[in-house]
Amino acid sequence: MRIKVTSEASEQCKEEFDHTHIAIIMAKSTPQKRSTLADVVTREYTIHLHKHVFGRSLRKRTPHAVKAVKAFAEKAMGTKDVRLDPALNKSLWSRGVKHINHRIRVRIARKRNDDENAKEKLYSYVTYVPVASFKGLETAVVDDNE
């Protein structure tokens, strides 16, 4: 079924149309920000370290990998305060300063800061997760009970 639009009908529509209506519809509403205090969560990630240390001078590879893990945790969890588990540090340094593993599996837990005078309300705690193979692993949310 075809509807024929006459010029009279289109003129009538233009007169009735209120241009302020467009401004109201098109104005972006500010999205509600979530409170990160309620987001105490633990996730497992695989970090591809080789892309961070490739081309880096040999004596700076593992120190840069440690900084890359901290930067990854800061970006993933949205906290400035990132703490590394000693076992994670040991696994990063296990092959020395020059030879770093290409990938590493980590569990990052965002926790509340118990110190009342702390600058940040939350901190991220990064631990090492030993895995046999990285094939098929994806980011996973972990229950805190484990």
Image: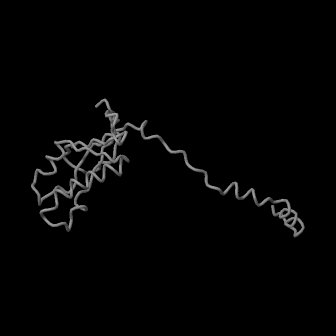
- The residue at 25%/45% (across/down) is 106
- Give the quadrant of residue 23: bottom right
User: Left or right: where does residue 42 sit relative to residue 58?
Assistant: right
Q: Is residue 44 above or below residue 112?
A: below
- Which image quarter holds the N terminus? bottom right
Q: Residue furthest bottom?
A: 7
Residue 36 point in image, percent of width and height: 43, 41
Between 1 and 104, the one lying in front of the other is 104
Q: Residue furthest right?
A: 8
Residue 30 point in image, percent of width and height: 58, 50
- Which image quarter holds the C terminus? top left
| Colour setting | one colour
Q: Residue furthest front?
A: 117
Count of picture labels = 0
- Give the quadrant of residue 88: top left
Residue 49 point in image, percent of width and height: 23, 57
Residue 143 point in image, percent of width and height: 34, 34
- Give the quadrant of residue 24: bottom right
Q: Is residue 40 above or below residue 95?
A: above
User: Left or right: where does residue 59 sit relative to residue 109?
Assistant: left
- The residue at 20%/42% (across/down) is 85
- The residue at 86%/63% (across/down) is 15
Between 30 and 95, the one lying in front of the other is 30
Q: Residue furthest top?
A: 145
